[in-house]
Amino acid sequence: MSKTIAVIRTLTPTHVGTGQAVGLIDQPIARSTATGWPILPAAGLKGVLKSEPLREAYQKHFASEQDEKEAVKKAELELADVFGHPEKGLGSLRIAEAQLVLFPVRSGFGTYALVTCPLALQHLATLAELAEIDFEAPDVPAGQNGPNGAPPVWVCQGSALIGGKLVVLDEYDLHPQDDRSVANGLAAKLAELLSLDEGDLKKRLAIVSDDLFTHLVRFCTEVRTTTALEVATKKVKDGTLRTAEFLPPYAVFAAYAEIPDEWMDNDKVVQLGANESTGAGIARIHWS
């Protein structure tokens, strides 16, 4: 078994929900109780990692047994050493809740930014320590407010996010700090750790305060309204109007994991959460 960090990057809008309404949102995404930041629960990650090998094992046993229940039982037992089984106890796979590292936010310049904050980077450093990977969170200085009290933001040299003397994230005007070394150094480290393109990350990376990051991840998700229609009349069925919250594409999460050695060189494309038939929840998992 190998200790590692599972790096999960959403490729399409993703809804991993809580099963209960919050305020005006009928189907909110899962969030940390302490921070309010989006999370990917460990049970769901384990489930998607199991789904493909379970399907392959089932098809193999069904082809020989021609009995659905027996094929399912044998497939589950075949995977028990890794994923666990009631008859055999816990499996060897360990994966923790995935924590948010980079969150995409609409930008007035450069289309979108990948935003992080000192607290998110400290969380990532803790995961790296557990996985025995060399990564230290940078020391982000307090920074200086700009004209009209614009909060500070740290970006890289050559950032695509700067227009004039401002960075505009969602509805907020931010003041880019003159020191580019903090973001430049972080971009290089994150690109290696998270298997991201360093050049693209340097164009989009923005480091903001913990408080502003918390606000952005709470209010910059996508909320979709869905309904069901009557087959004959095409009118909306009573009681079917729902609002669902989605993570945007290109959000990056990290989770501590212990996985079989042979998994290390195999990135996986998986489907997380609900709305699979409409293309939601497609994500890539990379083992750092």
Image: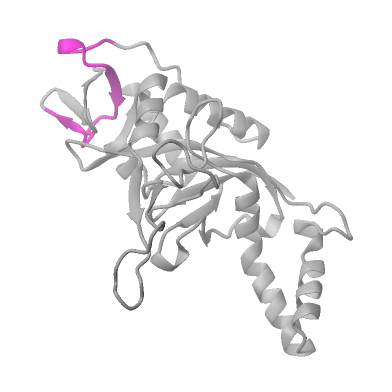
Above or below, comparing residue 254 to residue 236 in the picture: above
Q: Report the magenta residues as a range.
A: 144-163
Per the image, is 223 magenta? no
Residue occupying the far right of the picture: 87
Residue 36 horizontal side relative to residue 91, left or right: left
Residue at the image position 77 percent from the left and 86 percent from the top: 67
Q: Quadrant of residue 75?
A: bottom right
Percent position (x, y) of residue 235? 29, 68
- On whether residue 146 falls in the magenta region, the answer is yes
Of 252 and 136, nearer the camera is: 252
- Examine the rendered structure and indicate whether residue 256 appears above or below residue 267: above
Q: Is residue 137 left or right of residue 225?
A: right
How is the rendered protein coloured? Answer: one colour
Total numbered circles: 0
The vertical placement of 182 against 231, above or below, is: above
**Percent coordinates x, y for residue 208 in the rendering:** 35, 23
Q: Is residue 159 left or right of residue 131?
A: left
Q: Dividing the picture into quarters, in which one does residue 111 lie?
A: top left
Residue at x 48% of width, y 42% of height: 21
Q: Is residue 111 above or below residue 180?
A: below
- Residue 199 figure quarter: top left
Camera-side residue: 217 or 185? 217
Where residue 120 appears, as percent x and y from the top left, is 48, 28
254 and 191: which is toward the camera: 254
Task: Confirm whether residue 136 shows in the render.
Answer: no
User: Looking at the image, which residue is at 34% across and 45% down?
Assistant: 222
Q: Is residue 237 visible?
A: yes
| Residue 288: percent from left, percent from top | 56, 46
